[in-house]
Image: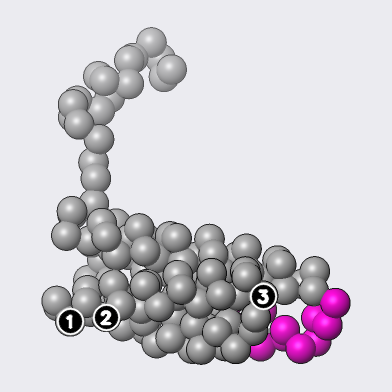
Amino acid sequence: MLAGHKFQELNPLEEPIMPDLRFQSCIDACNTCADACDHCAGACLREDNVKAMAECIRLDIDCAALCRLAAAAMARESDFAMRFCALCADICDACARECGQHQHQHCQDCAQACRRCAEECRRMAGAA
């Protein structure tokens, strides 16, 4: 606590500030995709032939980072959110293609999350 003040006195809003609900489905898809990509990258590093998984790992890392950036931009209603969403859709498509080539379940799960995220981001980018 700060100098005896209650949080409510410092923040008189009764409801937490939440992102615009029209973004929520895309934010959720981005966060789910980022988590799937992180999991996939980690699992790929544990595969016997890691070298064969190098492109998958690189795309997983890029995709996770951009998904989180796009989700954060939408949450704060950035003027650039729709541009991030358009780029996110492109990277998600690339990651889904790469992951889809591998038979590992973590890659298949990641590809599915990437396809859903690309669809949501493309929808958001088109809404601009």
Q: Where does label 1 land, which residue?
A: 126
Along the horizontal axis of the image, is 46 left or right of 42? right
Determine the residue positioned at 50% across, 65% down.
Answer: 34
Our reading of the magenta stretch's main secondary structure is: helix
Determine the residue positioned at 27% across, 80% down.
Answer: 122
Cβ atoms under marks 1 and 2 closer than 8 Å: yes
Magenta stretch in the rendered image = 48-60
Q: Where does label 3 land, which residue?
A: 104
Q: Position of residue 84 (x, y in %)?
A: 34, 77
Residue 58 part of the magenta segment: yes
Cβ atoms under marks 1 and 3 closer than 8 Å: no
C-alpha distance separating marks 3 and 2: 27 Å
Q: How many marks?
A: 3
Q: Where does label 2 land, which residue?
A: 122
Q: Nearer the viewer, residue 22 or 111?
A: 111
Q: Give amino acid for label 2.
A: Arg
- Rendered image quadrant of residue 55: bottom right
